[in-house]
Image (tube, helix red, strand yellow):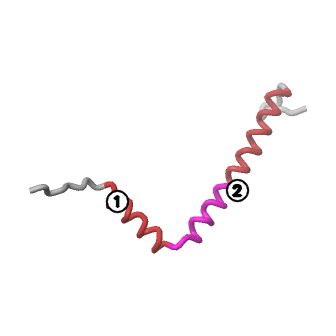
Amino acid sequence: MKTTKGGKVMNPTDAYRKELRKKELKRNKERKKVRQVGILKKDPQAMNEQIEKLEMMSKPFYYDFF
């Protein structure tokens, strides 16, 4: 039987949900680490070039028709 911090017995359904949530948080931590490693492996120069390109695309562009 699972118990709470106060020593009360938990509902089995609540205990199951709590266990699933704990597993989900653990998986999310692992995924976060994997994403950070992937970002660190990328070439910063290429990323900077891509950022500049996107910034140029987002600026308004005016044509002179005169």
Q: Which residue lies most toward the left here?
A: 66
The residue pinned by badge 1 equals 55
Residue name at image x 47 percent, y 72 percent: 46
Q: Which image quadrant for residue 50?
A: bottom left
Q: Is 55 on the left-hand or right-hand side of 18?
A: left
Using the rendered view, name the quadrant where residue 64 is placed.
bottom left
Q: Is residue 41 visible?
A: yes
Distance in Å between CA atoms under marks 2 and 1: 32 Å
Question: Which residue is found at the position 68% from the left and 50% from the top?
Answer: 28
Identified at 60% across, 62% down, the residue is 36
Q: Which of marks 2 and 1 is nearer the N terminus?
A: 2
Furthest residue in direction front, as rendered: 65
> What is the span of residues highlighted in magenta in the rendered image?
30-43
Residue 22 location (% of width, % of height): 75, 43
Amino acid of disc 2: Glu
The spot of residue 56 in percent (x, y) is 32, 61
Q: In this view, does 8 lie to the left or right of 41?
A: right
Q: Which amino acid does label 1 sit on?
A: Glu
Contact check, label 2 and label 1, Cβ < 8 Å: no
